[in-house]
Amino acid sequence: MTVFSLRNKSGNGIETILRRGPTRLERREWLEGYLFIAPWWLGFIIFTAGPFLAAIYLSMTKYDLVTSPRFIGAANYMQMLQDPLIFHSLQITAVYAVAGVILRFIVGLFLAILVNQKVPIVNFFRTAYELPTVITGVAVALMWQRVFHAEFGMVNNFLKLLGIQGPAWFGHPDWVVPTFILLNFWEAGRTMVIYLAGLQTIPNELYEAATVDGAGNFRKFQHITLPLLTPVIFFQIVLGIISSFQVFALAYIITQGGPANSSLFYVLYIYRQGFQYLDMGYASAMAEVLFLIILGITLVLWLTSGRWVFYMGEIRK
């Protein structure tokens, strides 16, 4: 490092620091840093950015996976406007997403509050609620298919003991989507863990001060717990909507979109267009629209989060 001291006409000293290029050690550290992040960058370019850009191009082509893509401009997007199943599948997916997010929020938060108590064998219950979420989607789908089977399923057999005739859960158009929504109970353990982490970051001093002021449990939850959990709630809502709009495995294995397309979720319809009808260009256009929908919802949540998401530092100020 070379330092020069200069003085201007008024006599004030100005210190100017001129530094040579990076040293050999610095260049080595930079190279090692780039090498460490190279696998992530390669994975992002090959498996995320590359397919995304390819899908944008294919969405403007006629491509059947056999012949070469033929550019047709915005024809696929115009076709979507005339496809009634597009709006049908989007409606089903939106209902599933909203109801599923609300259900996972209520159940997950309730379980997190329960396992946050200092009671015996609480670690057992934490593990028991979280353990089902590590099972793969195919195994979960096959299990629920058996549990809700109309003839010999566990649920309908239990209802028979009570003198109730159970419905055809996955076999009736009016019951299939509500049944899929009920399956969100299975994922409550994952949301419970995140809510539990958020609960344990809330200082006990706030609850002690509220107790001194005479606040009950409901007041504490309303004015302390819920506001300080809003960052976690925001995170859960964003991830929940993204995952709900991408639901595929359950519907594909259990119903394959039936009966009468009553469980034709949007991603399942994309799969049907791309790999059953071999219309990959149209499927790519549908995928790009899904990306824009999820991006739009995420941006709306992000832009409005300042009105209802509160952080500890802001509250202390």
Image (cartoon, rainbow, N blue to C red):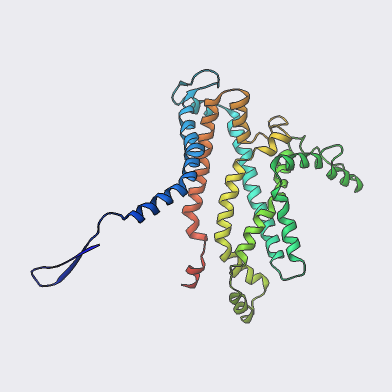
Is residue 103 shown left or right of residue 148?
left
Residue 22 image offset from top left, x and y in percent: 30, 54
Pick out the residue farthest to the top.
67
Between 316 and 14, the one lying in front of the other is 14
Is residue 26 shown left or right of residue 182?
left
136 vs 55: above or below: below
Residue for point 69% across, 55% down: 189
Question: In the rendered image, which quarter contains the N terminus?
Answer: bottom left
192 vs 94: above or below: below
Between 227 and 11, the one lying in front of the other is 11
Residue 212 image offset from top left, x and y in percent: 62, 82
Residue 271 image offset from top left, x and y in percent: 61, 30
Residue for point 53% across, 34% down: 287
Residue 165 image offset from top left, x and y in percent: 87, 41
Residue for point 73% across, 43% down: 140
Pick out the residue farthest to the bottom.
212
Q: Write down the quadrant of residue 193 in the picture.
A: bottom right
